Image (cartoon, grey):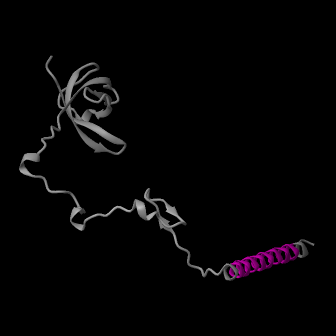
Amino acid sequence: MARSQQTFNKTEKEKKRLKKREEKQKKKEARKAAAKESGTSGIQFAYVDHNGHLVDTPPDPDQKVEVEAEDIVLGIPKKEEGDVEEFDPVRNGKVSFFDHSKGFGFIIDSENNEKYFVHISGTIDEITENDRVSFELEKGMKGMNAVRVKKLEE
């Protein structure tokens, strides 16, 4: 009895597969017929409007902007000697939390109030909560980390 049940299930599954295949073929033929009736082949045009979105209508020629080829800059423009901008990697902040038993804490930057993770291996001086410190930033696994942390004399 189990054997006949198994064959019945197999035949039912095969019937469903064939039915799906036939439906798919009918849909494909219907799409082809609709394309022939409307006079379009398979290729349709898409236009880009002035906002950069794809649309099916051509753009308005009045909104066309002429651009000179010389005005297009590829890459980063070269800096002139007067444009040199000095970036100080050393930042100042305050230790908001530090757990000596676990060896990590957080420093709040005094300029932008961002909170940065600090590990005990990234400290030069011993730090505690509410200490004013100077530090540098380095990219870590979960964001920016404070490294080379020094305690500031108050």
Give percent across and percent down for residue 50. 43, 58
In the picture, the quarter occupied by the N terminus is: bottom right
Outermost residue toward the top in this view:
154
Residue 107 versus residue 69: which sits nearer the camera? Answer: 69
Residue at image coords 34%, 42%: 143
The quarter of the picture where residue 73 lies is bottom left
Whether residue 16 is situated above or below residue 89 in the rendered picture: below
Q: Which quadrant would the C terminus be assigned to in this image?
A: top left
Give the residue displayed 32% in from the left and 29% down from the top: 106
- Residue that lies at the very extreme toward the right in this rendered image: 1
What span is colored magenta in the figure?
A: 6-34
Query: In x, y percent, where is residue 21?
Result: 75, 78
Please report the residue visible at 28 percent of the width from the left and 24 percent of the height from the top.
Answer: 95
Which residue is more in the foreground, 104 or 95? Answer: 95
Which one is in front, 32 or 125? 32
Q: For this rendering, which residue is in front, 119 or 82?
A: 82
Residue 146 falls inside the magenta stretch: no
Kindly indicate the quadrant of the structure image that contains residue 41. Answer: bottom right
Relative side of 59 to 117, left or right: right
Q: Is residue 80 left or right of residue 43?
A: left
Left or right of 56: which side holds 108? Answer: left
Residue 99 locus on image (x, y percent): 33, 25
In this view, 53 is above or below 131:
below
Q: Main secondary structure of the magenta part?
A: helix
31 is higher (above) or lower (below) than 78: below
- Number of marks: 0
- Residue 18 magenta-drawn? yes
Looking at the image, residue 49 sits to the left or right of residue 13; the answer is left
Q: Quadrant of residue 104?
A: top left
